[in-house]
Structure formats: C-alpha cells, structure tokens
Amino acid sequence: MVRLNRIYTRTGDGGTTGLGDGSRVRKDNLRVEAFGTVDETNACLGLARLHLSDQPALDAMLNRAQNDLFDLGADLCTPETGQPLGYEPLRIVASQVKRVEEDIDTLNAGLKPLRSFVLPGGTAAAAHLHLARTTCRRAERLMVALAAQPGETISAASLEYINRLSDFLFVAARFVNAAGPGDVLWVPGQNR
C-alpha cells in the first residue's frame, strides 16, 4: 500500500532520485527519463478524459490505461538486477497487453479504413489523445534505448504494452473523431 505523509523529502535536492530497489541515480538517468515520460503520458490521458463525458466506454478504457501506466512506472522504477529485494516488484504482465489489444479491436471495429495519414486534431479529446500517443511513443523510444544499455533489462511485456498503448491511443483518437467532425487527413504537398 502506498502511503505519502510528506511530499517533500529533500533527498532529491542534489539531483538524484531513489529507485524501487533502494539505489539512487541521477535525475537525468535514462531509466528516470523513461518512467518520467510514462508519467507524462498518463497526464496527457488525464487531459483527454476531461473531454470524454459523452464516451463512458472509452473513458473506462483510459482509466484502466492510466492505472496500467502507474504499474509500468513501478516496473521501470525497479531495475531487474537478479538481487533479492525483500518484496515482489510490480511488473507488467501479458494479460495487460492482451486487454489493450482487445480495446483496440473494440474501437477499431466500426472505423472506416484509412486512405491517408491522420493529422493530430479534430475534437479536443482527439487532439489530447494524439498528444498522449506521441508522448507514449517517446516513452517507448526511451525504454528501447534503456534496454540497449549494458546491464539493463526491460521486460518484453513492458515493451509490448507501451507499443500497443500508442496504437490504442491512435485508434481512440480516430474513434472520437468518427463521432464528430471526422479525422483531419494529411494532404501531401498541399502548401507547395
């Protein structure tokens, strides 16, 4: 159970932060960048949800995704070192990836096939979902970069989850726009 009695601890004043295994790293460490960008993605979802009062099923999907993103942050915050921790760390699991795939299929079922790339926009909700998607892709790039570092491990389920989530956010933006003005489509060379 999480318990936060004090918000400021002063332990990060020197530019370091604590990880789930008790170690301390610089705040610009690639691992911190990765879980910080996961947190940014979560904040973008919070903004998108403000515009979805008329879409309760999608809002529920995004609520689940926000909780999963906290799970992913906890996963990334606790390096897989093979050393005993004294507790079972929270990890992303295959069932979370599968659920996102099912959500994608549910939303995509009624959408027309794309014949052009989509520009971020349309409704306010869709624009926020596109922002979340691009932030999610940045988190994925950072996770891939972290996994490529010697001695670092990122689970396959975590990488699959973040990849599927960005796909879900793209489809969710299209789903919202389909109920409104429609997608804003790219017109190649339009302003030449």
Image (tube, rainbow, N blue to C red):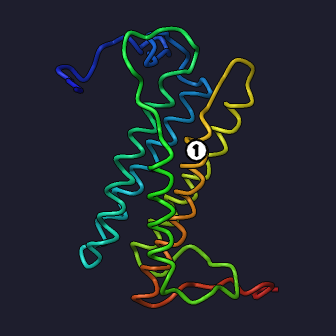
**Percent of width and height locating residue 138:** 61, 48
Residue at the spot x=70%, y=88% of the render?
115
Q: Is residue 112 left or right of residue 86?
A: right
Q: Is residue 49 left or right of residue 159?
A: left
The total of numbered circles placed on residues is: 1
Q: Is residue 132 above or below residue 26?
A: below
Residue at the spot x=70%, y=84% of the render?
116
User: 5 or 90: which is nearer to us?
Assistant: 90
* Quarter of the rendering occupied by the N terminus: top left
Q: Is residue 24 left or right of residue 3?
A: right
**Percent of width and height locating residue 114:** 65, 85
Please identify the quarter of the rendering in which residue 90 is found. Answer: top left
* Other residues around mark 1 within 10 Å, as few (<14) / some (14–19) / many (≥20): many
Please identify the quarter of the rendering in which residue 153 is found. Answer: top right
Q: Is residue 151 left or right of residue 52?
A: right
* Quarter of the rendering occupied by the C terminus: bottom right
Residue at the spot x=47%, y=66% of the render?
102
User: 28 or 174: which is nearer to us?
Assistant: 174
Q: Is residue 92 above or below residue 82?
A: below
Residue at the spot x=34%, y=46% of the render?
67
User: 104 or 145: which is nearer to us?
Assistant: 104
**Percent of width and height locating residue 13:** 41, 14
Q: Secondary structure at mark 1?
A: helix
Residue type indicated by callout 1: Ala
Q: Identify the residue under disc 1.
A: 139
**Percent of width and height locating residue 168:** 51, 64
Q: Is residue 14 above or below residue 78?
A: above
